């Protein structure tokens, strides 16, 4: 339902005048059995949208499928937006308006021949599944004066640039940070569009990047706001030994960052997991800290 995709929580037996932030005594676990006469108030917010973490909270197969469907639809809209912005910037080279370009008869015929709708075409451009230059050249979708009279535009056609995907928010549902190598903003990274209409992002040296049929991996450009501060949670998989936590905290403090909370536990006989909550910092500062921790001998993985 519409409420489901905008849900931020629920209150049990709460007075109508009570908001979610006023009192936490009405919060209950999801497996609590409701008694006869009890009420549940669903709280929604227009700017709330499904994200991948909802999948970890869903219990039934039906809710799991509905969340995945909502995420795909959300990602499709985002990909179309990215694709349209890309097309606008590229057609600007030829002084072409994107809406008028789509209305041209030869463009519409090309889309029909490729079995594409306008929306699907923009989605494929946004996810870098289709090369625009190849499409334009194959169906001769540019004015003759652009092809024959302007050397600058001919040079544009001949260049073979790697496709680029801009990440403006690492928490966007279209962005999938791979769990195999744990990339973070600032890493040299590559992207592969997956079946969930996501851009699956790997570190550049990851050995598990899926092969991309016919096209090279997408170059990732981290375009996050420089001024935005975020309270990052730093996770480390380390060798289980004494003095390690001290060395890790020293790196963080040397960067001028305060640790708000820390937790560590033994994963197995040889490995330990350390979790640190940091004060709000920029993504570049967080990347510098991670880059200093990765080369340490006792650190196996940082994210």
Image: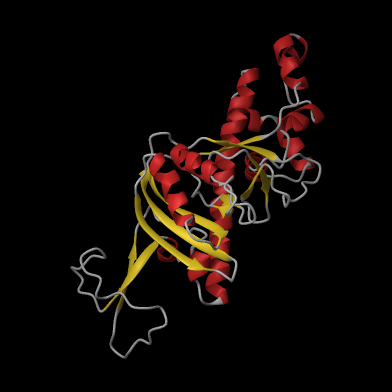
Viewer-side residue, 260 vs 78: 260
For image coordinates 76% across by 39% down, the residue present is 216
Relative to 9, is 214 on the left or the right? right
Relative to 22, is 222 on the left or the right? right
Q: Position of residue 255 (x, y in %)?
A: 41, 39
Q: Which quarter of the figure has residue 121?
A: top right
For image coordinates 65% across by 18% down, the residue present is 94
Residue found at the very far left of the displayed protein: 17
What's the coloring here? secondary structure
Height in image: 151 above or below 237?
A: above
- Classify the position of the N terminus by image quarter: bottom left
Relative to 158, is 250 on the left or the right? left
Q: Which quarter of the figure has residue 161?
A: top right
Residue found at the very far front of the displayed protein: 242
Q: Position of residue 97 (x, y in %)?
A: 59, 25
Viewer-side residue, 244 vs 105: 244
For image coordinates 58% across by 69% down, the residue present is 65
Viewer-side residue, 14 vs 277: 277
Residue found at the very far bottom of the displayed protein: 36
For image coordinates 59% across by 26% down, the residue present is 89
| Count of numbered tags | 0
Q: Position of residue 263 (x, y in %)?
A: 42, 63
Residue 150 visible in this rendered orientation of the protein: no
Viewer-side residue, 244 vs 233: 244
Residue 178 visible in this rendered orientation of the protein: yes
Height in image: 256 above or below 157?
A: below
Q: Position of residue 176 (x, y in %)?
A: 58, 52
């Amino acid at each position: 339902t519409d409420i489901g995709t905008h849900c931020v929580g629920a209150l049990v037996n709460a007075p109508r005048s009570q908001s979610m932030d006023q009192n936490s005594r009405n919060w209950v676990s999801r497996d609590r059995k409701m008694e006869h006469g009890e009420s549940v108030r669903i709280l929604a917010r227009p700017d709330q949208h499904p994200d991948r973490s909802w999948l970890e909270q869903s219990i039934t197969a039906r809710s799991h499928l509905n969340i995945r469907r909502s995420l795909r639809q959300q990602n499709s809209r985002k990909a179309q937006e990215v694709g349209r912005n890309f097309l606008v910037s590229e057609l600007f080279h030829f002084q072409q308006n994107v809406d008028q370009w789509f209305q041209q008869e030869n463009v519409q015929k090309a889309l029909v021949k490729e079995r594409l709708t306008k929306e699907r075409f923009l989605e494929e451009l946004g996810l870098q599944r289709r090369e625009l230059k190849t499409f334009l050249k194959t169906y001769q979708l540019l004015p003759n004066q652009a092809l024959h009279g302007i050397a600058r535009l001919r040079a544009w056609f001949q260049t073979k640039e790697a496709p680029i995907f801009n990440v403006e928010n690492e928490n966007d549902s279209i962005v999938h940070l791979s769990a195999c190598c744990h990339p973070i903003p600032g890493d040299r990274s590559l992207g592969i569009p997956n079946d969930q209409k996501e851009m699956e992002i790997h570190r550049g040296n990851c050995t598990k990047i899926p092969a991309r049929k016919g096209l090279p991996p997408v170059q990732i450009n981290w375009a996050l706001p420089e001024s935005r501060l975020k309270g990052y949670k730093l996770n480390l998989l380390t060798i289980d030994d004494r003095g390690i936590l001290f060395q890790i905290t020293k790196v963080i403090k040397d960067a001028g960052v305060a640790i708000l909370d820390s937790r560590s536990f033994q994963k197995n006989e040889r490995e330990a997991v350390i979790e640190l909550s940091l004060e709000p910092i920029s993504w570049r500062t967080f990347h510098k800290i991670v880059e200093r921790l990765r080369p340490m001998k006792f650190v196996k993985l940082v994210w």
